[in-house]
Amino acid sequence: MIPLPQSDSEAQLAAILKSLDDDKAEDVVQIDLRGKSAMGDYMVIASGRSSRQVAAISEHLVERLKQDHRVPSRTEGKDLGDWVLIDTGDVIVHVFRPEVRDFYQLEKMWQPAGPATAQG
């Protein structure tokens, strides 16, 4: 494969989404952070059905980014398999077991709020 330049966050995002799809990650959500946070351009949140699948999805993603695209990444939480954070610099990926994802509800913190309702 052709290496992706590290500054190309959209190309990194596409590679990440493909890897997650290849490994059967569930409920994949992408959140555009551009202009909202200095921590990265995109956040991706996905679920694996078990601790084993969460760890496998994460390991495969890190390896694919490194081998196929020369994108280094840092990980946290891989040993437990409940919640793995993968940071490429431009894209932050969270892979959760469903119960842990429901508990933290990161999507609600980062996605735009719905329309405000009038208080009467």
Image (cartoon, rainbow, N blue to C red):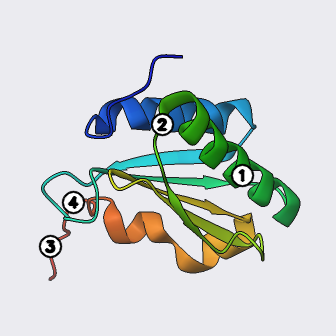
Picture coordinates of residue 11, whole percent (x, y) = 37, 29
Badge 4 density bin: few <14, some 14–19, many ≥20, Cα 10 Å? few
Q: Nearer the viewer, mark 3 or mark 4?
A: 4
In this rendering, the answer to whether 62 lies above or below 21 is: below
Label annotation for residue 70: 2
The numbered mark, 3 or 2, whose residue comes first in the sequence reads 2
The numbered mark, 4 or 2, whose residue comes first in the sequence reads 2
In this rendering, the answer to whether 52 lies above or below 27 is: below
Label annotation for residue 115: 4
Badge 1 density bin: few <14, some 14–19, many ≥20, Cα 10 Å? some
Distance between mark 1 and mark 4 Cα atoms:
39 Å
Label annotation for residue 82: none
Picture coordinates of residue 32, whole percent (x, y) = 29, 48
- What amino acid is at disc 3? Ala
Q: Nearer the viewer, mark 3 or mark 1?
A: 1
Q: Which residue is mark 1?
A: 59
Q: Residue at x 52, y 38 (%)?
A: 16
- Local SS, label 1: helix
In this rendering, the answer to whether 96 lies above or below 6 is: below
Q: Quadrant of the N terminus?
A: top right
Classify residue 86 as left or right of residue 13: right
